[in-house]
Amino acid sequence: MGIIDFLKKQAIEVIEWTDDSGDTLVYRFPVHQNEIKMGAKLTVREGQNAVFVCQGQIADVFKPGLHTLQTQNIPIITKILSLPYAFNSPFKAEVYFVSTRQFVDQKWGTTNPIMLRDKEFGMIRLRGFGIYSIKVSDPALFMKEIVGTDGHFTTDEITGQLKRIAVSGFSDFVATSGIPALDLATHYDELSAGVKTKLQPEFQTHGVELVKFIVENLSLPEEVEKMIDKRTQMGVVGNLQQYTQFQTAQAIEEAAKNPGGMAGIGPAMGAGFAMANQMAQSMAAGQQAAANPAQSAAAPAAAAGAAGAATTGAKFCVECGGALPAEGKFCPHCGKPRG
């Protein structure tokens, strides 16, 4: 009888866990020889569950609250141990505290670019990254599938696997979404919600809930971004002839501010107008050929004749841009034939 009383005094009477680590998912309570006193107090705080493991089996899961460990409220342990009702001797079990709070700001990102087929650019490579939040939704399943007998299980031990699942699901969803590459930036919310829905079943097989999935950034290769920038610049320029006239007006204004600046404005204007005239003719010829395919063969000859006529009657030298007199075969500025 004295030995039994001694064992009761040595058994654990208070079981609780306060976590100050910030990254612990599962913590095994240190019990000396796994002996717990019948009638001991178990404190489970909000954001926790306590999992009892007896003889290698998950016996019970306790929700937040204060629990008194007796045969009345742990009948599974009583059945496993074949103990009579109201038996008060210490019993052996392992107690695992599982954190059920959210673990936020978990990073995900594509290690290698994702190959996609875009309607406008063809085959492109895409990178993406963001964050996600998780929490343990099924402590018993989480213990069975992931933790095992690990006495101190942290987020670092599972985030690698979850990240790979997240990137795989993200890649598949983006590839099948059909969203053009240029419009991806305006669909971050839609992508985030869609990927979360797609990944949720896979996360739940591990006893984990995917609370949030956020796409922070999607980027194209540098060379593709440069081409997009050039296309944007062309769109901003718009009408080339009007743009050239605007640039010329700006040059005149700047030259007028500097002494002697107007002396060189004539040749510059001549060169600018000549270039704009040639480009405008080329663009007009291309548009006419597209509109009249039957006349496309005669278009080059017609353009050449028009160019020659324009050169003969030009008012500015095509070589130096200087103003030409009404008569004369040579440019008075550079001496080159006026054409």
Image (spheres, helix red, strand yellow):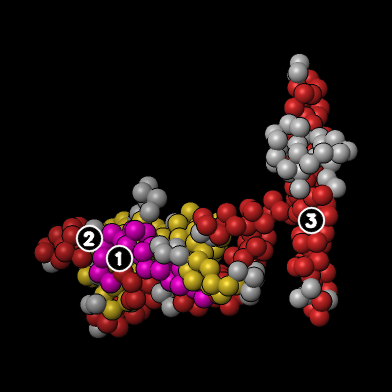
Of 275 and 145, nearer the camera is: 275
Span highlighted in magenta in the image: 148-172
Q: Which residue is mark 3?
A: 308
Q: Quadrant of residue 258?
A: top right
Farthest left residue?
A: 3
Distance CA(mark 1)–CA(mark 3): 96 Å
Residue at horizontal 83 percent and vertical 74 percent from the top: 291
* Residue at 60% in and 69% down: 121
Q: Give the mark nearest the N terminus, 2 or 1.
A: 2
Q: Are marks 2 and 1 in contact (CB under 8 Å)?
A: yes
Q: Is residue 38 visible?
A: no
Distance Cα–Cα, label 2 vs label 1: 8 Å
What amino acid is found at the position of numbered circle 1 in the picture? Val
160 in magenta: yes
Residue that mark 1 sits on = 95
**Residue identified by numbered label 2:** 31
Q: Residue at coordinates 36% horizontally, 49% vertically from top-left?
A: 21
Q: Is disc 3 surrounded by few (<14), some (14 to 19) or many (20+) residues within 10 Å?
A: few
Gap in Å between the C-alphas at discs 2 and 3?
101 Å
The structure residue drawn at horizontal position 51% and vertical position 55%, both measured from the top left corner, is 222
Location of residue 213 in the rendering, given as x and y in whole percent from the top left corner: 54, 63
Q: Amino acid at mark 3?
A: Gly
